[in-house]
């Protein structure tokens, strides 16, 4: 087996490294359809309708005897999935680094999530509990798999090429999301011509995302390879490795305190990414409730975001090569702030302007996420990739409740979605300041990694 080089990549020829990179891209291609078609478009409204069919005359369902409004089932299930993911991600990351066997864990998480998503075809009638359980399993599995997927980046790409490789991964994901969403919309809008009811069409759309996820996950699982680590002397996967994983996790938390600049970047990312995720999750609510736009307009806008996010991820990757990843991210945060200001001023019932706003979001969405991932990869000590990326993924997913909370409180206090959307400016402004204060070259050097010529 080839040894690892000083920059963390494999000491084999360029063809082998490119082969791994191309395989790595395809995991984004495989799993992104879940985020787009399932979470963003179809599952929320459909699961809510299933829960309403199971509700009593007062509109309540009673899981475990607890009264819950049917309309709250979907967000509650998402919240539970986040808790499950937060508990699982650091443990899986620690075990992966301890054993050096990320690929079996990635396969297990990917196929558990894909199977749960495909199982959503059974979601009919009043089976809201089944739908909630499948959502929790699929969402948590996606989060765990992304920890392992992201941890490959510093091993398959050298410091000078990580911005490009990370951006291409995001571009692959947005491409698949847009492609499958187009196919799903054709099926959904023309379900009668296919001999399907509306409910059956939605269930096919949900299940197809799971089939797609599982099928294309085969590509990275064939091309990526595990690297041996110092922990390979320990038992492989099993009870011993799990116990060692918990001990390693505790050591990782202590170790991260020895890298305060890495933690400073994580804090900045937590803040501005929370703003990004909240804009994405609440844009449809803002469009329908404040701007009076119909469902077709909102779904088409989501598709536009997916298509332009591909160009945005690749374009910002090129900007990073000439201006540095940190400056490019800071520029994107300024654009996000302008997007919120434009959204606040947007007149109601003007689909054209809403599409323009969606286009702007698409152009900065993929790039800001891709470059954040590549920038963080420089701050991870060698041999701790999966554990440190579990902390990154927890920042991405586990703490994504704060933005929606601010959005909801602003609406509750003012009764205006315009006030709620402009309240999110604080996340981008504070994130800009926190990121600008991180001395990236010193942070990379202190993590023990080679400093790229341009960062």
Image (cartoon, rainbow, N blue to C red):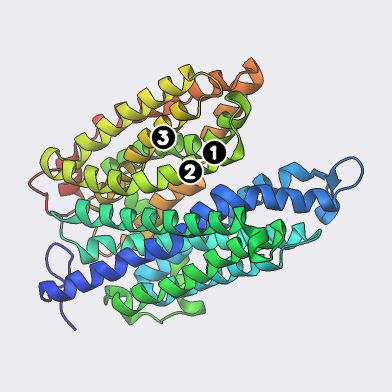
Q: Residues within 10 Å of mark 2 (few under 14, many from 20)?
A: many
Q: Quadrant of residue 235?
A: bottom left
Q: Point out residue 417 in the picture as x, y percentages from the top left corner.
A: 58, 22
Residue at the spot of label 1: 298
Q: What is the C-alpha distance between the residues marked 1 and 2? A: 6 Å
Reading the chain from its start, which is encountered first: label 3 or label 2?
Answer: 3
The residue depicted at 26 percent of the width and 37 percent of the height is 329
19 vs 398, left or right, is left
Q: What is the C-alpha distance between the residues marked 1 and 3? A: 26 Å
Residue at the spot of label 2: 302
Q: Quadrant of residue 11?
A: bottom left
Q: Is residue 453 above or below residue 357?
A: below
Give yes or no for contact between labels 3 and 2 (Cβ–Cβ under 8 Å).
Answer: no
Q: Point out residue 171 in the picture as x, y percentages from the top left corner.
A: 31, 54
Q: Evaluate whether residue 249 shows in this view.
A: no
Reading the chain from its start, which is encountered first: label 1 or label 3?
Answer: 3
Q: Residues within 10 Å of mark 3 (few under 14, many from 20)?
A: many
The label nearer to you, 1 versus 3, is: 1
In the rendered structure, find residue 271 and report the number of the disc placed on it. 3
Q: Residues within 10 Å of mark 1 (few under 14, many from 20)?
A: many
Q: Point out residue 125 in the picture as x, y percentages from the top left corner.
A: 80, 60
395 vs 112, left or right, is left
Q: Is residue 220 above or below residue 66?
A: below
């Amino acid at each position: 087996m080839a040894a690892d080089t000083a920059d963390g990549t494999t000491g084999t020829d360029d063809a082998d490294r490119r082969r791994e990179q191309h395989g790595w891209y395809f995991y984004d291609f495989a799993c992104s359809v879940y985020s787009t078609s399932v979470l963003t478009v179809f599952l929320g409204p459909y699961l809510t309708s299933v829960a309403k069919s199971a509700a009593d005359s007062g509109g309540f369902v009673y899981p475990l005897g607890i009264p819950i409004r049917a309309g709250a089932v979907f967000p509650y299930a998402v919240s539970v999935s986040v808790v499950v993911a937060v508990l699982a991600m650091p443990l899986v990351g620690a075990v992966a680094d301890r054993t050096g066997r990320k690929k079996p864990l990635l396969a297990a998480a990917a196929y558990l999530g894909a199977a749960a998503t495909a199982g959503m075809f059974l979601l009919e009638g009043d089976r809201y509990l089944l739908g909630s359980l499948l959502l929790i399993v699929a969402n948590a599995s996606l989060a765990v798999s992304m920890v392992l997927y992201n941890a490959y980046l510093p091993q398959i790409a050298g410091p000078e090429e990580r911005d490009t490789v990370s951006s291409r991964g995001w571009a692959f994901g947005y491409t698949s999301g847009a492609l499958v969403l187009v196919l799903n919309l054709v099926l959904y809008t023309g379900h009668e011509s296919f001999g399907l009811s509306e409910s059956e069409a939605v269930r096919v759309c949900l299940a197809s995302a799971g089939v797609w996820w599982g099928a294309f996950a085969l590509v990275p699982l064939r091309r990526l390879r595990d690297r041996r680590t110092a922990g390979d002397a320990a038992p492989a996967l099993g009870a011993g490795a799990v116990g060692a994983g918990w001990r390693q996790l505790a050591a990782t938390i202590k170790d991260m305190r020895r890298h305060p600049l890495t933690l400073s970047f994580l804090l900045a990312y937590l803040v501005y990414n929370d703003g990004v995720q909240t804009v994405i999750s609440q844009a449809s609510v803002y469009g329908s409730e404040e701007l009076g736009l119909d469902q077709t307009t909102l779904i088409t806008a989501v598709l536009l975001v997916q298509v332009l996010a591909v160009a945005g991820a690749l374009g910002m990757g090129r900007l990073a090569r000439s201006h540095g990843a940190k400056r490019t991210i800071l520029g994107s945060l300024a654009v996000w702030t302008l997007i919120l200001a434009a959204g606040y001023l947007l007149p109601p019932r003007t689909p054209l302007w809403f599409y323009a706003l969606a286009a702007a979001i698409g152009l900065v969405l993929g790039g800001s996420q891709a470059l954040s991932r590549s920038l963080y990869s420089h701050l991870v000590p060698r041999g701790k990739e999966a554990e440190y990326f579990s902390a990154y993924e927890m920042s991405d997913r586990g703490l994504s409740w704060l933005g929606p909370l601010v959005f909801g409180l602003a609406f509750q206090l003012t009764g205006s979605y315009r006030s709620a959307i402009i309240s999110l400016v604080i996340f981008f402004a504070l994130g800009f300041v926190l990121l600008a204060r991180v001395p990236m070259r010193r942070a990379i050097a202190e993590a023990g990694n080679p400093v790229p010529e341009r960062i």
